[in-house]
Image (cartoon, rainbow, N blue to C red):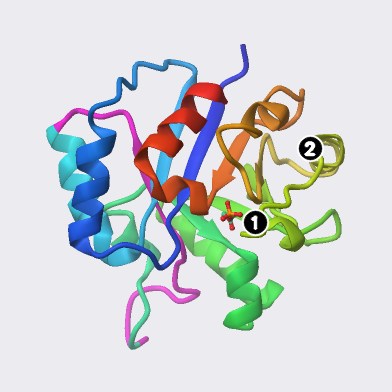
Amino acid sequence: MKRKFIVANWKSNFTSLEVNQWIERFKNYDLGFTNKGVIICPPFVMLPILKSYLSNHKSSIKLGAQNVSPFDEGAYTGEVSAKQIKEFADYVLIGHSERRKNFMESDEILFKKVELANKYGLAPIFCVQDETTKIPENVKMVAYEPVFAIGTGNPDNPETAEKIAKQIKENTKVTTVLYGGSVTSKNVKDFTQTPDINGVLVGGASLDAQEFYAIIQNA
Ligand code: 13P
């Protein structure tokens, strides 16, 4: 059976109190899935809270950041470097459409981010919006997230998503393709049961601990 990844992108949501409330609810569920990798990508400032919770509970859940500086450590006010993130996380989202659109992130900047993530042992989860998005050579995990499906309740159809996942794998060195965009516990299986989609990247529905657990279960 293929290993599936269920990745939560919390975006700019949750105060520390709300993170603790989410954990309180989520910890009641059994996470004994051996064939499922669960990754939570909280805002930077919440990484330490989650890291200490997960290590105290010997949890198999991994952490990811939602962004990384395109520069190495040094005089880059306001940026968080790959070296710093690696103290708390194993993964990093790079190239989310919200960053491309709201922060004008170009392919050139995104390629630099991937290079630095790899340099410090952070695995990039590189987001692509369609089959034309450029993917850097040294990326193994990609998330296909069509813009029309993000936060709209209008997911792509699984056949199209599967076709794009297959195409990405055929044309690059990518081994893992996730689908993202309006994933819920009701539709997750439609995506994860296809041959080339290896998991999902979940926004809104991951903010509810019970719904996120149902997504993991149903994936
Ligand atoms: P939604 O699941 O809220 O549509 O968001 C998808 C997304 O952007 C995950 O990165």
**Residue at the (48%, 23%) spot, across then down:** 217
- Tell me, for residue 20, which label it has, or none: none
Mark nearer the N terminus (1 vs 2): 1
Secondary structure beneath label 2 = helix
Ligand 1 near label 1 (Cβ, under 8 Å)? yes
Q: Which residue is mark 1?
A: 127
* Predominant SS of the magenta segment: loop
Name the quadrant of the C terminus: top right
Q: What's drawn in magenta, residue-wise?
A: 57-76
The correct choice, above or below, for 94 with respect to 38 in the image is below
Q: Specify whether residue 58 is painted magenta.
A: yes
Q: Position of residue 178 (x, y in %)?
A: 64, 40
Q: Position of residue 63 (x, y in %)?
A: 36, 46
Q: How many marks?
A: 2
Closest to the observer: 201 or 44? 201
Q: Which residue is mark 2?
A: 169
- Left or right of 195: which side holds 67? left
- Left or right of 115: which side holds 175? right
**Residue at the (55%, 23%) spot, across then down:** 218
The amino acid marked with disc number 2 is Lys
**Residue at the (51%, 32%) spot, across then down:** 215
Q: Position of residue 16 (x, y in %)?
A: 20, 61
Q: Specify whether residue 73 is painted magenta.
A: yes
